[in-house]
């Protein structure tokens, strides 16, 4: 997301990252070598986008200074290495319990995620809603036979699943538990497909 911002806005966010307590408009203007008016305009845009918020005010002996700081959402836009940790964990768990038990664990995790979302079986449209909340960019597609299938245009675990295909078991278990059925994984991006296709089978 940061790449879509202008250079000045990126520099402003970076300055706030290094000043966790917040910075005033005057401090930001000095740091960025721009006018106070420009800082105000950039802050207004970043506040609107949920990247900056107003923090505490700081006494100055005159009028208190308003401090601005990063939101949690903004901090998440800076580089993170969750995938590295997840990949190491999967390797370690596989080494401890073995590949078959790891597959069982992934399925168990998928079923648990499903039960946290629905208490009863739901249809493909409702499954897609849950998937999209997680970022799968999924939709229900009807084949010429009239049978529905779920098509996901984004795999939220793609790089991780490419290194550890067993991760796909979590998706299959999640979808299967939500739909109360076995899942046929007809096309998979990890296996070179353009999308991931899932079909529920009673």
Image: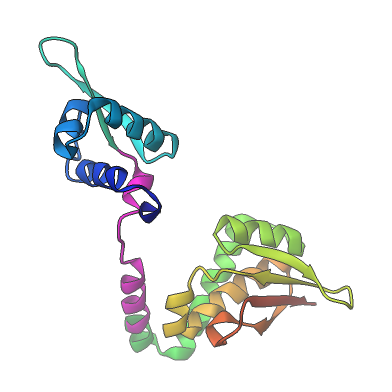
Q: Nearer the viewer, residue 168 or 189?
A: 189
Number of residue marks: 0
Residue 88 is situated, as x and y percent measured from the top left of the image, at 31, 78
Q: Give above or below for 32 relative to 184.
A: above
Residue 159 is situated, as x and y percent measured from the top left of the image, at 43, 76
Q: Is residue 175 left or right of residue 147?
A: left
Q: Give above or below for 197 relative to 57.
A: below
Q: Is residue 146 visible?
A: yes
Residue drawn at point x = 50 percent, y = 68 percent: 156
Q: Nearer the viewer, residue 16 or 146?
A: 16
Residue drawn at point x = 14 percent, y = 16 percent: 59
Residue drawn at point x = 14 percent, y = 9 percent: 62
Q: Give above or below for 52 relative to 109.
A: above
> Which quadrant holds the C terminus?
bottom right
Range of residues picked out in magenta: 70-91
Res. 154 image quadrant: bottom right
As drawn, which residue projects farthest toward the top? 62
Q: Nearer the viewer, residue 192 or 4?
A: 4
Residue 192 is situated, as x and y percent measured from the top left of the image, at 56, 86
Q: Is residue 120 left or right of residue 54?
A: right
Q: Nearer the viewer, residue 105 or 50?
A: 50
Q: Give above or below for 152 relative to 69.
A: below
As drawn, which residue projects farthest toward the left? 61
Dominant secondary-structure state across the stretch colored magenta: helix
Q: Is residue 122 visible?
A: no
| Residue 202 counted in the magenta span | no
| Residue 74 counted in the magenta span | yes
Res. 89 image quadrant: bottom left
Residue 27 is situated, as x and y percent measured from the top left of the image, at 16, 30
Residue drawn at point x = 52 percent, y = 82 percent: 104
């Amino acid at each position: 997301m940061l790449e879509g911002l202008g250079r000045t806005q990126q520099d402003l966010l970076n300055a706030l990252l290094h000043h966790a307590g917040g910075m005033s408009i005057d401090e930001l203007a000095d740091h960025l070598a721009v006018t106070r008016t420009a800082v105000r305009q950039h802050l207004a845009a970043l506040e609107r986008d949920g990247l900056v918020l107003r923090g505490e005010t700081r006494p100055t002996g005159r009028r208190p200074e308003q401090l601005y700081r990063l939101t949690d959402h903004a901090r998440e836009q800076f580089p993170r290495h969750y995938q590295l940790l997840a990949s190491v964990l999967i390797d370690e768990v596989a080494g401890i319990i073995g590949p078959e038990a790891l597959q069982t664990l992934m399925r168990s995790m998928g079923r648990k995620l499903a039960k946290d979302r629905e208490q009863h079986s739901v249809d493909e449209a409702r499954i897609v809603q849950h998937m999209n909340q997680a970022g799968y960019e999924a939709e229900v597609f009807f084949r010429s036979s009239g049978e529905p299938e779920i098509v996901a245009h984004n795999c939220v675990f793609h790089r991780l699943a490419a290194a550890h295909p067993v991760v796909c078991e979590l998706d299959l278990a999640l979808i299967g538990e939500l739909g109360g059925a076995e899942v046929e994984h007809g096309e998979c991006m990890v296996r070179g497909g353009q999308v991931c296709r899932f079909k529920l089978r009673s």
